Image: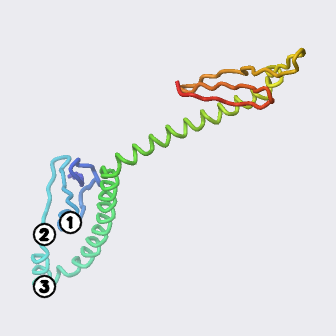
């Protein structure tokens, strides 16, 4: 018949088992795994003490016992690898107590990175605006010889409003306020 080796509370299939498979029951108990028949099947259970009693009393049984032991060892090694892999996958996918904190920190980091990117872009925009329009907004009165202050530009990006102002001395000030 056909069996399925399942692991964990969700019953995740670890390995399909077909006719002639050798399974160590102690290994199943150790990892908390179970067998589920996928079709009508027959399963034989032999105790080690019974096997040893047969081997010691019947001389002709010894020629198949050692090959059986070798097959049993290979099957146990294979099942151990598969079950330990399933156990590791189960532990990795389990929720950790710090997961919520890590998700919160990640979201804050993304948000601050987006704000920093916006501020860098705003600074680039303001620098190019100042360079292009500085001379046109600082006006000199020809009669008095005084320079007047002029507003260069006002930009609103998100919740930040920025105003660039040129002073009579030719310096530029940037005023930013949250809206």
Q: Residue under circle 3?
A: 56
Give the secondary structure at mark 3: helix
Give the secondary structure at mark 1: helix
Q: Residues within 10 Å of mark 1 (few under 14, many from 20)?
A: few
Name the image quarter holding residue 66: bottom left
Instruction: Decide if residue 66 is on the left or right side of residue 164.
Output: left
Name the image quarter holding residue 85: bottom left
Residue located farthest toward the right when viewing the structure as drawn? 142
Q: Is residue 80 above or below residue 17?
A: below
Q: Nearer the viewer, mark 1 or mark 3?
A: 1
Q: Position of residue 50 (x, y in %)?
A: 9, 76
Q: Residues within 10 Å of mark 2 (few under 14, many from 20)?
A: few
Q: Position of residue 60 (x, y in %)?
A: 17, 81
Q: Residue at x 55, y 35 (%)?
A: 115
Q: Report the front residue among 132 and 42.
A: 132
Q: Position of residue 126 (x, y in %)?
A: 70, 29
Q: Residue under circle 2?
A: 46
Give the secondary structure at mark 2: loop
Q: Is residue 172 above or below residue 11?
A: above
């Amino acid at each position: 018949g056909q069996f399925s080796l399942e692991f964990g509370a969700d019953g995740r299939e670890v390995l399909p088992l077909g006719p002639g498979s050798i399974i160590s029951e102690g290994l199943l108990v150790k990892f908390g795994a179970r067998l589920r028949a996928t079709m009508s099947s027959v399963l034989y259970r032999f105790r080690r003490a019974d096997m040893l009693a047969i081997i010691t009393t019947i001389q002709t049984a010894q020629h198949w016992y050692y090959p059986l032991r070798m097959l049993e060892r290979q099957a146990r090694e294979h099942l151990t690898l598969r079950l330990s892999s399933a156990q590791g996958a189960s532990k990795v996918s389990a929720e950790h107590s710090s997961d919520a904190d890590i998700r919160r920190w990640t979201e804050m980091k993304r948000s601050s990175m987006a704000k920093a990117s916006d501020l860098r872009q705003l600074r680039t925009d303001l620098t190019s605006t100042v360079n292009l329009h500085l001379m046109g907004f600082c006006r000199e009165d020809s009669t008095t010889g005084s320079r007047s202050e002029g507003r260069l530009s006002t930009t609103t990006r998100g919740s930040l409003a920025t105003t660039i102002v040129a002073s009579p001395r030719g310096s530029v000030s940037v005023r930013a306020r949250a809206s």
